Amino acid sequence: MTPAQDLAVRRSHRVRSARLTELYEFFTAHNKLYSERAVQRRAGHFVDHDPVFERANGDTTSAAAHDFEQAMDADQSNVRQRVVADAAASPEEELLVRSAGGVHVSYDGSTMAERLQVAGPARNQGPTVAGGPVVIRQGGALVPDSTPFLVEMLVPGLIAFGRGGPDEPRPVRVSKLECLRHYALLSLRRFAQDTVYTLMAFDMSARHQAMAQASLYCRLSSTEQNAAIANVTPQELSALLDYDTACLSAARNNLPRPPVPPDVGRAKTLTNRFRAAAAHGKGSNPARQVHLRRGFSLQTRFGSASLFVTISPKDNGSLTVAYLAGQVACDKLEEIDISNLPSQAARFAATSKDPVACARYFNRIVRCFFQDVVGYDREEQRPHARGGIFGHVEAFIAGFETQGDGTLHFHSMLWLYGMAGGRLQLADLLKSDSYRASFLSFSDSVQCHSAPLPTEATCPTCVDAPGAVVAVEPSSVAFTRAAGRTEAPVTARCVTCKSEFGYGDLIMAS
Protein backbone atom coordinates (compact mmCIF):
# COMPACT_ATOMS: atom_id res chain seq x y z
CA MET A 1 0.00 0.00 0.00
CA THR A 2 1.45 3.35 -1.06
CA PRO A 3 1.54 6.32 1.36
CA ALA A 4 -1.18 8.03 -0.68
CA GLN A 5 -3.42 4.98 -0.47
CA ASP A 6 -2.64 4.67 3.22
CA LEU A 7 -3.66 8.27 3.83
CA ALA A 8 -6.83 7.86 1.74
CA VAL A 9 -7.86 4.77 3.69
CA ARG A 10 -7.26 6.47 7.02
CA ARG A 11 -9.12 9.61 6.03
CA SER A 12 -12.08 7.56 4.82
CA HIS A 13 -12.53 6.24 8.37
CA ARG A 14 -12.09 9.48 10.34
CA VAL A 15 -14.78 11.25 12.36
CA ARG A 16 -15.67 14.93 12.10
CA SER A 17 -14.93 16.29 15.55
CA ALA A 18 -17.14 19.40 15.78
CA ARG A 19 -20.47 17.72 16.46
CA LEU A 20 -18.83 14.86 18.35
CA THR A 21 -17.11 17.28 20.72
CA GLU A 22 -20.35 19.15 21.36
CA LEU A 23 -22.26 15.95 22.14
CA TYR A 24 -19.39 14.69 24.27
CA GLU A 25 -19.34 17.82 26.42
CA PHE A 26 -23.11 17.71 26.84
CA PHE A 27 -23.16 14.07 27.96
CA THR A 28 -20.19 14.43 30.28
CA ALA A 29 -22.04 17.26 32.01
CA HIS A 30 -25.41 15.49 32.40
CA ASN A 31 -24.82 11.74 32.27
CA LYS A 32 -23.85 10.03 35.52
CA LEU A 33 -22.20 7.22 33.62
CA TYR A 34 -19.62 9.68 32.30
CA SER A 35 -19.46 12.13 35.19
CA GLU A 36 -18.60 9.49 37.79
CA ARG A 37 -15.65 8.08 35.83
CA ALA A 38 -12.26 9.40 34.92
CA VAL A 39 -13.08 10.54 31.41
CA GLN A 40 -10.33 11.77 29.14
CA ARG A 41 -11.04 13.23 25.74
CA ARG A 42 -8.40 13.00 23.10
CA ALA A 43 -9.20 15.70 20.57
CA GLY A 44 -7.50 16.40 17.29
CA HIS A 45 -6.20 12.88 16.62
CA PHE A 46 -8.68 11.70 14.02
CA VAL A 47 -6.07 10.76 11.39
CA ASP A 48 -3.62 8.08 12.44
CA HIS A 49 0.10 8.52 11.99
CA ASP A 50 2.64 5.89 11.08
CA PRO A 51 2.45 3.09 13.66
CA VAL A 52 5.13 2.79 16.31
CA PHE A 53 5.57 -0.56 18.04
CA GLU A 54 7.39 -1.54 21.18
CA ARG A 55 10.50 -3.61 20.73
CA ALA A 56 11.64 -6.36 23.05
CA ASN A 57 14.46 -4.16 24.45
CA GLY A 58 12.05 -1.36 25.35
CA ASP A 59 13.01 1.02 22.51
CA THR A 60 10.24 2.48 20.38
CA THR A 61 11.31 2.73 16.76
CA SER A 62 9.57 2.66 13.42
CA ALA A 63 8.74 -0.81 12.18
CA ALA A 64 10.45 -2.36 9.23
CA ALA A 65 8.92 -2.26 5.77
CA HIS A 66 7.45 -5.75 5.91
CA ASP A 67 6.34 -5.23 9.51
CA PHE A 68 4.66 -2.00 8.45
CA GLU A 69 2.69 -3.78 5.72
CA GLN A 70 1.62 -6.52 8.11
CA ALA A 71 0.64 -3.95 10.69
CA MET A 72 -1.44 -2.05 8.15
CA ASP A 73 -3.25 -5.25 7.15
CA ALA A 74 -4.02 -6.09 10.77
CA ASP A 75 -5.02 -2.51 11.51
CA GLN A 76 -7.38 -2.28 8.56
CA SER A 77 -8.92 -5.65 9.36
CA ASN A 78 -10.03 -4.13 12.65
CA VAL A 79 -11.03 -0.81 11.14
CA ARG A 80 -14.55 -0.99 12.56
CA GLN A 81 -13.08 -1.08 16.06
CA ARG A 82 -10.34 1.50 15.54
CA VAL A 83 -9.37 3.77 18.41
CA VAL A 84 -7.15 6.81 18.63
CA ALA A 85 -4.24 4.91 20.12
CA ASP A 86 -1.70 7.37 18.71
CA ALA A 87 -2.82 9.87 21.35
CA ALA A 88 -1.61 7.63 24.17
CA ALA A 89 0.80 9.21 26.60
CA SER A 90 2.82 6.03 27.12
CA PRO A 91 3.31 2.63 25.51
CA GLU A 92 1.30 1.03 28.33
CA GLU A 93 -1.65 3.31 27.66
CA GLU A 94 -1.41 2.65 23.92
CA LEU A 95 -1.50 -1.08 24.61
CA LEU A 96 -4.64 -0.79 26.75
CA VAL A 97 -6.39 1.49 24.28
CA ARG A 98 -5.66 -0.78 21.34
CA SER A 99 -6.77 -3.80 23.35
CA ALA A 100 -10.09 -2.12 24.15
CA GLY A 101 -10.56 -1.38 20.47
CA GLY A 102 -9.76 -4.88 19.28
CA VAL A 103 -6.47 -3.94 17.54
CA HIS A 104 -3.92 -6.51 18.71
CA VAL A 105 -0.52 -6.06 17.03
CA SER A 106 2.61 -7.37 18.74
CA TYR A 107 6.12 -8.05 17.45
CA ASP A 108 8.13 -8.56 20.64
CA GLY A 109 7.24 -12.22 21.08
CA SER A 110 5.20 -11.83 24.26
CA THR A 111 1.52 -12.64 24.38
CA MET A 112 -1.16 -10.00 24.69
CA ALA A 113 -2.18 -11.33 28.11
CA GLU A 114 1.39 -10.94 29.42
CA ARG A 115 1.67 -7.39 28.12
CA LEU A 116 -1.70 -6.42 29.60
CA GLN A 117 -0.72 -7.92 32.94
CA VAL A 118 2.38 -5.74 33.02
CA ALA A 119 0.69 -2.58 31.76
CA GLY A 120 -2.49 -2.91 33.81
CA PRO A 121 -1.24 -2.14 37.35
CA ALA A 122 0.76 0.88 36.23
CA ARG A 123 -2.15 2.34 34.31
CA ASN A 124 -4.74 1.77 37.05
CA GLN A 125 -2.85 3.97 39.51
CA GLY A 126 -5.15 6.89 38.77
CA PRO A 127 -6.53 9.65 41.00
CA THR A 128 -10.00 8.03 41.07
CA VAL A 129 -11.26 4.66 42.20
CA ALA A 130 -14.17 4.55 39.76
CA GLY A 131 -12.16 2.69 37.14
CA GLY A 132 -10.12 3.37 34.02
CA PRO A 133 -10.85 6.06 31.46
CA VAL A 134 -13.80 5.82 29.11
CA VAL A 135 -12.41 5.28 25.62
CA ILE A 136 -14.42 6.73 22.74
CA ARG A 137 -13.74 4.54 19.74
CA GLN A 138 -13.06 6.02 16.36
CA GLY A 139 -15.76 5.17 13.82
CA GLY A 140 -16.33 5.75 10.17
CA ALA A 141 -17.84 8.81 8.58
CA LEU A 142 -21.61 9.10 8.87
CA VAL A 143 -23.28 8.14 5.59
CA PRO A 144 -26.98 8.96 5.01
CA ASP A 145 -29.33 6.39 3.52
CA SER A 146 -29.90 8.73 0.58
CA THR A 147 -26.35 8.19 -0.67
CA PRO A 148 -26.56 6.99 -4.29
CA PHE A 149 -25.82 3.29 -4.76
CA LEU A 150 -25.30 2.80 -1.02
CA VAL A 151 -26.73 -0.73 -0.96
CA GLU A 152 -24.62 -1.74 -3.95
CA MET A 153 -21.48 -0.56 -2.15
CA LEU A 154 -22.38 -2.23 1.16
CA VAL A 155 -23.11 -5.66 -0.33
CA PRO A 156 -21.10 -5.78 -3.56
CA GLY A 157 -21.01 -9.57 -3.54
CA LEU A 158 -24.81 -9.87 -3.74
CA ILE A 159 -25.56 -7.38 -6.51
CA ALA A 160 -23.72 -8.41 -9.67
CA PHE A 161 -21.67 -5.64 -11.32
CA GLY A 162 -23.44 -3.07 -9.13
CA ARG A 163 -26.56 -3.16 -11.32
CA GLY A 164 -30.12 -3.87 -10.28
CA GLY A 165 -29.98 -2.24 -6.88
CA PRO A 166 -32.59 0.07 -5.32
CA ASP A 167 -31.10 3.13 -7.08
CA GLU A 168 -31.16 1.54 -10.52
CA PRO A 169 -33.18 3.65 -13.04
CA ARG A 170 -36.35 1.78 -13.99
CA PRO A 171 -39.30 2.54 -16.29
CA VAL A 172 -41.61 2.13 -13.30
CA ARG A 173 -40.38 3.65 -10.07
CA VAL A 174 -39.92 1.22 -7.17
CA SER A 175 -39.42 2.44 -3.63
CA LYS A 176 -36.24 1.48 -1.82
CA LEU A 177 -38.11 -0.35 0.93
CA GLU A 178 -40.09 -2.49 -1.51
CA CYS A 179 -36.89 -3.23 -3.40
CA LEU A 180 -35.12 -4.34 -0.21
CA ARG A 181 -38.12 -6.47 0.72
CA HIS A 182 -38.14 -8.05 -2.76
CA TYR A 183 -34.47 -9.00 -2.44
CA ALA A 184 -35.05 -10.60 0.98
CA LEU A 185 -37.92 -12.75 -0.37
CA LEU A 186 -36.07 -14.04 -3.44
CA SER A 187 -35.94 -17.81 -3.74
CA LEU A 188 -32.16 -17.62 -4.14
CA ARG A 189 -31.98 -16.81 -0.40
CA ARG A 190 -28.58 -15.20 -0.81
CA PHE A 191 -29.90 -11.89 0.49
CA ALA A 192 -32.02 -13.48 3.23
CA GLN A 193 -29.12 -15.54 4.57
CA ASP A 194 -26.61 -12.69 4.51
CA THR A 195 -26.06 -11.32 8.01
CA VAL A 196 -25.10 -7.82 6.84
CA TYR A 197 -27.97 -7.38 4.39
CA THR A 198 -30.79 -8.38 6.75
CA LEU A 199 -29.61 -6.03 9.50
CA MET A 200 -29.00 -3.21 7.03
CA ALA A 201 -32.43 -3.63 5.41
CA PHE A 202 -34.22 -3.58 8.78
CA ASP A 203 -32.32 -0.48 9.93
CA MET A 204 -33.01 1.33 6.67
CA SER A 205 -36.69 0.49 6.88
CA ALA A 206 -36.98 1.73 10.48
CA ARG A 207 -35.06 4.94 9.75
CA HIS A 208 -37.08 5.61 6.62
CA GLN A 209 -40.39 5.33 8.45
CA ALA A 210 -39.18 7.56 11.28
CA MET A 211 -37.66 10.19 8.96
CA ALA A 212 -40.75 10.25 6.74
CA GLN A 213 -42.88 11.06 9.77
CA ALA A 214 -40.40 13.71 10.93
CA SER A 215 -40.46 15.30 7.47
CA LEU A 216 -44.26 15.34 7.58
CA TYR A 217 -44.23 17.13 10.93
CA CYS A 218 -41.82 19.74 9.57
CA ARG A 219 -44.00 20.37 6.52
CA LEU A 220 -47.21 20.69 8.52
CA SER A 221 -45.71 23.03 11.12
CA SER A 222 -45.13 26.73 10.67
CA THR A 223 -41.78 28.18 9.66
CA GLU A 224 -41.46 30.05 12.94
CA GLN A 225 -41.98 26.88 14.96
CA ASN A 226 -39.41 24.95 12.94
CA ALA A 227 -36.91 27.78 13.29
CA ALA A 228 -37.46 27.91 17.05
CA ILE A 229 -36.89 24.19 17.39
CA ALA A 230 -33.74 24.38 15.27
CA ASN A 231 -32.28 26.95 17.69
CA VAL A 232 -32.66 24.92 20.87
CA THR A 233 -29.68 25.55 23.14
CA PRO A 234 -27.86 23.08 25.40
CA GLN A 235 -29.06 25.10 28.40
CA GLU A 236 -32.69 24.45 27.43
CA LEU A 237 -32.00 20.74 27.01
CA SER A 238 -30.31 20.69 30.41
CA ALA A 239 -33.32 22.40 32.01
CA LEU A 240 -35.63 19.88 30.34
CA LEU A 241 -33.58 16.97 31.71
CA ASP A 242 -33.82 18.43 35.20
CA TYR A 243 -37.58 18.86 34.80
CA ASP A 244 -38.03 15.28 33.59
CA THR A 245 -36.00 14.04 36.56
CA ALA A 246 -38.19 16.04 38.93
CA CYS A 247 -41.35 14.64 37.30
CA LEU A 248 -40.05 11.09 37.64
CA SER A 249 -39.18 11.63 41.30
CA ALA A 250 -42.63 13.09 41.98
CA ALA A 251 -44.33 10.13 40.31
CA ARG A 252 -42.32 7.65 42.40
CA ASN A 253 -43.25 9.47 45.61
CA ASN A 254 -46.94 9.84 44.61
CA LEU A 255 -46.64 13.63 44.49
CA PRO A 256 -48.18 16.08 42.01
CA ARG A 257 -46.24 16.97 38.89
CA PRO A 258 -44.06 20.08 39.35
CA PRO A 259 -44.81 23.19 37.26
CA VAL A 260 -43.22 23.45 33.83
CA PRO A 261 -40.24 25.85 33.73
CA PRO A 262 -40.67 28.74 31.29
CA ASP A 263 -37.45 28.02 29.37
CA VAL A 264 -38.14 24.43 28.26
CA GLY A 265 -40.85 25.08 25.67
CA ARG A 266 -38.71 24.71 22.57
CA ALA A 267 -36.78 21.75 23.97
CA LYS A 268 -40.03 20.02 24.97
CA THR A 269 -41.46 20.47 21.48
CA LEU A 270 -38.26 19.07 19.98
CA THR A 271 -38.30 15.95 22.16
CA ASN A 272 -42.02 15.41 21.52
CA ARG A 273 -41.43 15.52 17.78
CA PHE A 274 -38.52 13.16 18.11
CA ARG A 275 -40.59 10.63 20.07
CA ALA A 276 -43.48 10.92 17.62
CA ALA A 277 -41.15 10.24 14.69
CA ALA A 278 -39.23 7.45 16.44
CA ALA A 279 -42.52 5.74 17.32
CA HIS A 280 -42.85 4.76 13.65
CA GLY A 281 -39.54 2.87 13.79
CA LYS A 282 -40.30 -0.78 14.43
CA GLY A 283 -38.82 -2.13 17.63
CA SER A 284 -37.96 1.25 19.16
CA ASN A 285 -38.80 2.24 22.73
CA PRO A 286 -41.17 5.05 21.60
CA ALA A 287 -43.06 2.45 19.53
CA ARG A 288 -43.53 0.33 22.66
CA GLN A 289 -44.77 3.38 24.54
CA VAL A 290 -47.34 4.03 21.81
CA HIS A 291 -48.65 0.46 22.08
CA LEU A 292 -48.84 0.83 25.85
CA ARG A 293 -50.96 3.97 25.54
CA ARG A 294 -53.18 2.26 22.98
CA GLY A 295 -53.76 -0.58 25.40
CA PHE A 296 -54.78 1.88 28.12
CA SER A 297 -57.10 3.67 25.71
CA LEU A 298 -58.80 0.39 24.77
CA GLN A 299 -59.32 -0.38 28.44
CA THR A 300 -60.84 3.06 28.91
CA ARG A 301 -63.14 2.49 25.93
CA PHE A 302 -64.19 -1.16 26.47
CA GLY A 303 -63.28 -1.85 30.09
CA SER A 304 -61.11 -4.70 31.31
CA ALA A 305 -60.04 -7.21 28.70
CA SER A 306 -61.97 -10.46 28.52
CA LEU A 307 -58.99 -12.66 27.66
CA PHE A 308 -55.21 -12.46 27.81
CA VAL A 309 -53.57 -14.82 25.32
CA THR A 310 -49.88 -15.56 24.75
CA ILE A 311 -48.73 -17.22 21.52
CA SER A 312 -45.17 -18.59 21.40
CA PRO A 313 -44.50 -20.30 18.06
CA LYS A 314 -41.34 -22.38 17.98
CA ASP A 315 -39.77 -21.05 14.82
CA ASN A 316 -36.25 -22.15 15.74
CA GLY A 317 -36.06 -25.81 14.92
CA SER A 318 -39.34 -25.75 13.00
CA LEU A 319 -39.65 -28.04 10.00
CA THR A 320 -41.62 -25.36 8.14
CA VAL A 321 -38.89 -22.77 8.70
CA ALA A 322 -36.28 -25.27 7.52
CA TYR A 323 -38.36 -25.72 4.36
CA LEU A 324 -38.64 -21.95 3.84
CA ALA A 325 -34.88 -21.70 4.33
CA GLY A 326 -34.33 -24.19 1.51
CA GLN A 327 -32.92 -26.97 3.69
CA VAL A 328 -35.87 -29.41 3.46
CA ALA A 329 -37.40 -30.75 0.25
CA CYS A 330 -41.09 -30.22 -0.41
CA ASP A 331 -41.85 -33.95 -0.64
CA LYS A 332 -40.91 -34.39 3.02
CA LEU A 333 -43.76 -32.07 3.96
CA GLU A 334 -46.28 -33.87 1.76
CA GLU A 335 -45.50 -37.36 3.06
CA ILE A 336 -44.06 -37.01 6.53
CA ASP A 337 -41.82 -39.87 7.56
CA ILE A 338 -40.56 -39.46 11.10
CA SER A 339 -37.53 -41.67 10.43
CA ASN A 340 -36.49 -39.55 7.43
CA LEU A 341 -36.87 -36.08 8.93
CA PRO A 342 -33.81 -33.88 9.61
CA SER A 343 -32.50 -33.92 13.14
CA GLN A 344 -33.18 -31.14 15.59
CA ALA A 345 -29.60 -29.90 15.26
CA ALA A 346 -30.00 -29.68 11.48
CA ARG A 347 -33.26 -27.75 11.87
CA PHE A 348 -31.64 -25.38 14.35
CA ALA A 349 -28.79 -24.75 11.90
CA ALA A 350 -31.22 -24.13 9.04
CA THR A 351 -33.33 -21.63 10.98
CA SER A 352 -30.43 -19.78 12.60
CA LYS A 353 -28.91 -18.71 9.29
CA ASP A 354 -32.15 -17.47 7.67
CA PRO A 355 -33.93 -14.79 9.76
CA VAL A 356 -36.22 -13.95 6.84
CA ALA A 357 -37.65 -17.48 6.87
CA CYS A 358 -38.30 -17.15 10.61
CA ALA A 359 -40.07 -13.82 10.03
CA ARG A 360 -42.24 -15.29 7.26
CA TYR A 361 -43.21 -18.20 9.48
CA PHE A 362 -44.05 -15.91 12.39
CA ASN A 363 -46.20 -13.67 10.17
CA ARG A 364 -48.12 -16.72 8.96
CA ILE A 365 -48.73 -17.86 12.53
CA VAL A 366 -50.03 -14.41 13.49
CA ARG A 367 -52.28 -14.22 10.43
CA CYS A 368 -53.71 -17.69 11.01
CA PHE A 369 -54.28 -17.02 14.70
CA PHE A 370 -56.34 -13.86 14.23
CA GLN A 371 -58.01 -14.99 11.00
CA ASP A 372 -58.98 -18.55 11.92
CA VAL A 373 -58.66 -18.96 15.68
CA VAL A 374 -59.86 -15.56 16.88
CA GLY A 375 -62.14 -15.04 13.88
CA TYR A 376 -61.30 -11.38 13.27
CA ASP A 377 -60.79 -9.73 9.89
CA ARG A 378 -57.89 -7.32 10.34
CA GLU A 379 -58.37 -5.71 6.94
CA GLU A 380 -62.06 -4.92 7.47
CA GLN A 381 -61.58 -4.25 11.20
CA ARG A 382 -64.54 -6.40 12.24
CA PRO A 383 -65.16 -9.97 13.46
CA HIS A 384 -66.25 -12.71 11.10
CA ALA A 385 -69.91 -13.75 11.19
CA ARG A 386 -68.87 -17.25 12.26
CA GLY A 387 -66.86 -15.86 15.17
CA GLY A 388 -63.89 -17.67 16.68
CA ILE A 389 -63.16 -20.22 19.36
CA PHE A 390 -63.59 -17.51 22.01
CA GLY A 391 -66.72 -15.98 20.53
CA HIS A 392 -67.13 -12.70 18.63
CA VAL A 393 -64.22 -10.35 19.27
CA GLU A 394 -65.06 -6.68 19.63
CA ALA A 395 -61.48 -5.38 19.83
CA PHE A 396 -57.96 -6.66 20.44
CA ILE A 397 -54.38 -5.48 20.79
CA ALA A 398 -51.17 -7.49 20.50
CA GLY A 399 -47.62 -6.65 21.53
CA PHE A 400 -44.58 -8.46 20.15
CA GLU A 401 -41.36 -9.07 22.01
CA THR A 402 -38.24 -11.22 21.89
CA GLN A 403 -37.87 -14.34 24.01
CA GLY A 404 -34.73 -15.48 25.73
CA ASP A 405 -33.63 -17.62 22.77
CA GLY A 406 -34.06 -14.74 20.30
CA THR A 407 -37.36 -15.88 18.80
CA LEU A 408 -40.53 -13.79 18.73
CA HIS A 409 -43.79 -14.24 20.57
CA PHE A 410 -46.69 -11.95 21.34
CA HIS A 411 -49.21 -11.20 24.07
CA SER A 412 -52.74 -10.24 23.11
CA MET A 413 -55.72 -8.81 25.00
CA LEU A 414 -59.17 -9.60 23.59
CA TRP A 415 -62.49 -7.89 24.26
CA LEU A 416 -65.56 -10.06 23.55
CA TYR A 417 -69.14 -9.09 22.87
CA GLY A 418 -71.47 -9.82 25.78
CA MET A 419 -68.72 -9.90 28.41
CA ALA A 420 -68.53 -7.67 31.47
CA GLY A 421 -66.40 -4.56 31.14
CA GLY A 422 -65.03 -4.58 34.68
CA ARG A 423 -64.88 -6.36 38.00
CA LEU A 424 -67.86 -4.57 39.53
CA GLN A 425 -70.01 -5.16 36.48
CA LEU A 426 -69.03 -8.84 36.46
CA ALA A 427 -69.95 -9.18 40.14
CA ASP A 428 -73.41 -7.76 39.43
CA LEU A 429 -73.98 -10.04 36.45
CA LEU A 430 -72.86 -13.14 38.33
CA LYS A 431 -75.78 -12.69 40.70
CA SER A 432 -77.98 -14.00 37.90
CA ASP A 433 -78.05 -17.81 37.83
CA SER A 434 -78.40 -17.99 34.05
CA TYR A 435 -75.45 -15.64 33.44
CA ARG A 436 -73.36 -17.49 36.03
CA ALA A 437 -74.01 -20.83 34.33
CA SER A 438 -73.18 -19.35 30.92
CA PHE A 439 -70.00 -17.75 32.25
CA LEU A 440 -68.80 -21.02 33.83
CA SER A 441 -69.56 -22.90 30.63
CA PHE A 442 -67.59 -20.34 28.63
CA SER A 443 -64.64 -20.55 31.05
CA ASP A 444 -64.54 -24.34 30.79
CA SER A 445 -64.66 -24.17 27.00
CA VAL A 446 -61.73 -21.76 26.57
CA GLN A 447 -59.50 -22.87 29.45
CA CYS A 448 -57.99 -26.26 28.68
CA HIS A 449 -54.53 -27.65 29.37
CA SER A 450 -54.51 -30.30 26.64
CA ALA A 451 -56.13 -31.13 23.34
CA PRO A 452 -59.73 -32.36 23.85
CA LEU A 453 -60.35 -36.06 23.29
CA PRO A 454 -62.44 -36.66 20.14
CA THR A 455 -65.88 -38.08 20.85
CA GLU A 456 -65.56 -40.73 18.13
CA ALA A 457 -62.35 -42.18 19.59
CA THR A 458 -62.42 -45.97 19.88
CA CYS A 459 -60.11 -48.41 21.56
CA PRO A 460 -57.32 -49.62 19.22
CA THR A 461 -56.81 -52.86 21.21
CA CYS A 462 -60.40 -54.17 21.04
CA VAL A 463 -60.65 -56.54 18.04
CA ASP A 464 -64.27 -57.71 17.84
CA ALA A 465 -66.22 -54.66 19.00
CA PRO A 466 -64.05 -51.59 19.63
CA GLY A 467 -65.24 -49.94 22.79
CA ALA A 468 -65.52 -46.24 23.50
CA VAL A 469 -62.59 -44.40 25.07
CA VAL A 470 -63.29 -41.96 27.88
CA ALA A 471 -61.00 -39.39 29.44
CA VAL A 472 -59.57 -40.08 32.89
CA GLU A 473 -58.61 -37.39 35.36
CA PRO A 474 -54.83 -37.61 35.93
CA SER A 475 -53.70 -38.54 39.41
CA SER A 476 -51.41 -36.42 41.56
CA VAL A 477 -48.42 -38.50 40.41
CA ALA A 478 -48.85 -37.08 36.90
CA PHE A 479 -47.91 -33.62 38.18
CA THR A 480 -44.61 -34.71 39.72
CA ARG A 481 -41.26 -34.61 38.01
CA ALA A 482 -40.60 -37.17 35.30
CA ALA A 483 -37.63 -38.59 37.26
CA GLY A 484 -40.03 -39.94 39.88
CA ARG A 485 -42.17 -41.88 37.38
CA THR A 486 -41.51 -45.11 35.54
CA GLU A 487 -44.30 -44.80 32.95
CA ALA A 488 -46.47 -42.13 31.38
CA PRO A 489 -49.56 -41.11 33.37
CA VAL A 490 -52.92 -42.53 32.31
CA THR A 491 -55.18 -40.01 30.55
CA ALA A 492 -57.77 -42.30 28.85
CA ARG A 493 -59.38 -45.72 29.42
CA CYS A 494 -61.47 -48.12 27.30
CA VAL A 495 -64.89 -48.87 28.78
CA THR A 496 -64.92 -52.40 27.29
CA CYS A 497 -61.49 -53.96 27.78
CA LYS A 498 -60.35 -51.50 30.45
CA SER A 499 -57.12 -50.78 28.56
CA GLU A 500 -55.35 -47.61 29.71
CA PHE A 501 -53.59 -45.14 27.44
CA GLY A 502 -51.11 -42.33 27.87
CA TYR A 503 -51.17 -38.88 26.33
CA GLY A 504 -49.70 -40.01 22.99
CA ASP A 505 -50.91 -43.59 22.63
CA LEU A 506 -54.20 -42.78 20.89
CA ILE A 507 -52.52 -40.28 18.59
CA MET A 508 -49.87 -42.78 17.48
CA ALA A 509 -52.49 -45.54 17.02
CA SER A 510 -54.79 -43.37 14.88
Image: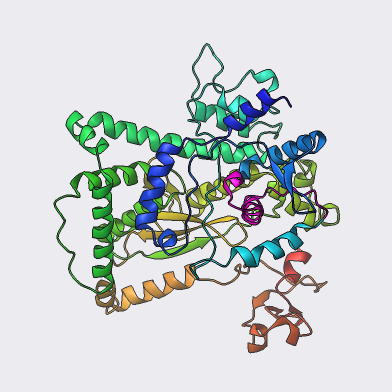
Total number of numbered labels? 0
The image shows residue 176 at horizontal and vertical percentages of: 51, 26
- Name the quadrant containing residue 409: bottom right
Does 451 appear in magenta? no
Q: Relative to residue 46, is residue 255 depicted above or below?
A: below
Residue closer to the observer: 349 or 87? 87
Lateral position of residue 293 relative to residue 160, left or right: left
The image shows residue 445 at horizontal and vertical percentages of: 48, 69
Lateral position of residue 424 relative to residue 184, left or right: left
Residue closer to the observer: 372 or 349? 349
Lateral position of residue 459 relative to residue 254, left or right: right
Q: How is the image coloured?
A: rainbow
Q: Which residue is found at the position 57% from the left and 37% from the top?
A: 200
Q: Which residue is found at the position 61% from the left and 82% from the top?
A: 473
| Residue 396 in view of the camera | no
Does 108 appear in magenta? yes
Where's the N terminus, which quadrant? top right
Q: Which residues are magenta?
A: 84-109
The image shows residue 483 at horizontal and vertical percentages of: 75, 84
| Residue 9 in view of the camera | yes
Q: Which residue is found at the position 56% from the left and 22% from the top?
A: 149
Q: Relative to residue 267, is residue 396 depicted above or below?
A: below
Residue closer to the observer: 109 or 130? 109
Q: Relative to residue 384, is residue 112 depicted above or below?
A: below
- Name the quadrant containing residue 223: top left
The image shows residue 280 at horizontal and vertical percentages of: 39, 42
Where's the C terminus, which quadrant? bottom right
